[in-house]
Amino acid sequence: MAKKKKRPIKKTQKKLSLKHLLFFIIGIAVLIVFIPTTALLFVGMIPTMVAFVVDRQPGRNKTFTIGVMNFTGCFPYVLDVWLHANSMDYSLSLLAQPKTIIVMYSAAAVGYIIDWGVTLIVSAILVQRSEMRLKRIEKEKKALIDRWGKEVDGLQTLDEKGFATALGSQQKMHEA
Amino acid sequence: MDSAVKNDVKQDDPDAVIDQAPSYDISGADNRAADNGVRLNKDILILYDTPLSALDKGDVKAFKAQGSGKVPVNLFALICARHLTPRASIANKYAAIINPDMAKIVASGKVKWTDGKEYYAFIFEDTLGAPLVNRSNKYPALGWKPETVLTNVIKPMIHVLMDLRDKDIVHGEIWPGNIFDGGSAAKDKVRLGECMSAPPSALLPALYEPIERAMADPVGRGLGTIEDDLYAFGVSLAVILRTVDPMEGASDEKIIASKIEKGTYATLISRDRFSGAVLELLRGLLYDDKNQRWGFDEIQAWMDGRRLSPKQSPKRIKANRPLEFNGKKYIRPELLAKDLSKNTLEAVRLVDNGELQMWLDRAMEDKSIRGRMEPTLNDMPSSRGENFSKKLATRVAIALNPDMPIDYNGLKFMPDGFGKLFSQAYVLKKDLQPFIEVIKGVFMLQIIRQKPSVDQSALINKFDSARAYISQTKIGSGLERCLYSFDKDAPCFSHVLDDHYVLEPEDLVRALDDIAKKKIRPERLLDRHMIAFLSVKDRKNVDPYIIELGANERHKQVMGEVRVLATIQKRSQLEDFPALAAWIAERFAPVYERFHDRQKRESLKRHVTKVAATGDLTRLAVIFEDEHLYQNDFYTFKQAMDEFQSLEKERTIIEEKLKMKKGYGLKSGRQIASFIALFVSMASILLIAFKILSSNANL
């Protein structure tokens, strides 16, 4: 039986490691081929890398937000590199310009702002909605009590017909 | 128009029964102010301002009445006293007798009197004239001539008595105060008065009763027999014929003692001498031994002219030496029996020291008394509880004279007279403790077994049942049940019905409808008295609901009440009772509370109000008969409970989340931020790419 269980695990593990290896090799190959772009992105996406390290939330939505905006800031320069020499020198010359870094990092900052702002707004909306829902719940509960009596809350000991009894020996209705 | 009339009056029909229309007009109007009287029904008006004192019978009062339509004009009414249960049940039989020499009944029923209360009334044709003697003159000596008596009294009265016998009616009030001259100065139209306005023999003076019955309380004498009527007739003849009352001024007790010592004839007649037919008749009717007393066969033979040889009365038992008791000496056991209750402790002493037994053994030749005394004394309990002496005295008295009334703790009654005495005591608010002791005491059963002349099994069953009822406190039992079991003619004694006279279940429903119209109403619709009354009168229709009526839960009581009344209304096909139905509807609050759904309650309330307006109690009761009504309510209630629980859970979850306000919505916010950033990024990238590529193209 143990042997049977082990076999599928071994197979998937083998499959996963091959896939990953393949991607890794392709990735390295791309990076080497497009090394000017890589160098540009490496420097330009530093805010994203920092966010990646800092962001511990599952899903890493903050990292994504900052990342996509950071990339947006890097994109014109990446396109410039592609359209011009696609050389390492050109990349480095772009990186040497302060304007490049400012644009790239400002875009990342916009990502931070979007993340902070939207989260704040959404949180406030959700809190308000929940508070309104609580009020509605109280209203509905009151309506139920008004229509069905206090016994509907299930907190009292009820007889078999659902009426409150002074004696405590009967089962609670909602347990029945 | 009047409410349901049970029978129509048909004057010429020999099988006619009287009009027993109830007194209340269905319109509820009191016509007193207009008519100077009170109406029994549309044809009979009782003139409350014209009393007829000559026709009064103690607490039963007579008033002039007027008839109209098919009813004769000249009438009189007898308004019955509330503490004397009238004999309404024999009215129909009485009315069926067609004999001009007796009071002719025209109608009976309840009437609302000037004090606002209902009383039972009997209406008769006013053809009686004046009584032969004033009622206060109980023991007259009229000195009529025998020939006159023979023609004017004996012949017509014998036929009246025969007619009563044929209808199985014991009259119980035959005496000159209730025999009338027919309005003729010559007294040749003698008429016998009525016998229904009070319990049997309750209004008859003791002189006219046989020895044993005379010892009882008048109301407790019981029904009696036709033979007792013949005795009373004989005594009546004697007092009409005699010129001297040898017992003038004597008390009833002395008269009874004289009858025991000398016999009735010798007590009544001393100096007067009668002969021939009259003497024979008197002797025959006045035998103290009822087995010797003349019956109708002998009377018929006498009327036919056949002369029967007078029988010698058997000698009353007499001891050959006296027994001293309570300072007096007794040689007659009947006299001793009569007086034992005067000193019950002395009676115990006589038994304990063996004096009584010795007297019976040695001084009395008659073995029958010894035969009765032995089991009586053997039956005595070894432990002497409360009232032992009184019980002993009673039992010993019965052993000495089984025909005498039961004499216990101030009560003197024949076994079948207990009920009427009990009812009277209840109405007059007398001490009921002696009655309760009689009912609870096993000694009553032992006494009844010693009385040969009564229907022992029926009486024993009655007292046995009563003993069971009185020890139960549940509704439908208790003292109230005993009252109505013993006196089936009694009206309902509930204080709620003080102004009403309720004889039948139908009367009760109508009375409650009347009460429903008043501002002040009792808390319960049917109290203990009413339920006990209905249990006796209408057992089949009431007993199925006894448990509900006696339940602790209000809603069960209310439903029990409406079901009982609805059953009566339907069974008797009574008219609608909107007022009563409205009152019942007001009491339905506990029934509505059996539904959880308040909206359902309101809708039921509206429906009940609508149905109540029709006055149909059956429809009202049926509203809550559908079991599905309750099941659906319960089912939807359970659903509501589930809904409440889920709301409660949701509330708890939201409150937990809100406790962490800081981090609340963080995840969702970031997700949305991601989407926004992606969108902005893609739009920006496209825009930038387009711009750059188009500027390059231009170049």
Image: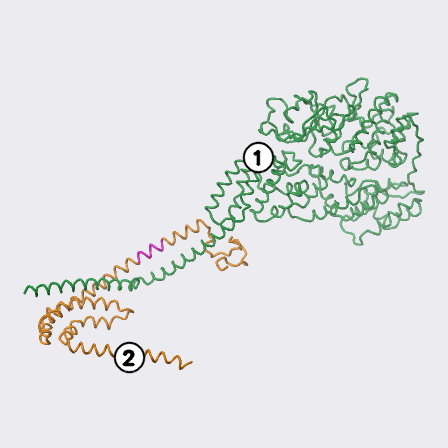
Chain colours: A orange, B green
Q: Amino acid at mark 2?
A: Ser
Q: Is residue B468 left or right of residue B600?
A: right
Tell me the residue that label 2 is attached to: A17
Q: Quadrant of the N terminus of chain B?
A: top right
Q: Is residue B283 magenta?
A: no
Residue found farthest to the top: B185
Q: Chain of mark 1?
A: B
Q: Amino acid at mark 1?
A: Asp
Query: Is any part of residue B273 visible from this angle?
Result: no
Q: Is residue A49 left or right of residue B378?
A: left
Residue range (magenta)? A127-135
Query: Is any part of residue B282 visible from this angle?
Result: yes
Q: Which mark is residue A54?
A: none
Look at the magenta stretch and give its main secondary structure: helix
Tell me the residue that label 1 is attached to: B576
Residue found farthest to the left: B699
Residue B575, percent from left and from top? 59, 34
Residue B163, percent from left and from top? 80, 29
* Residue situated in front as seen by the camera: A160 or B177: A160
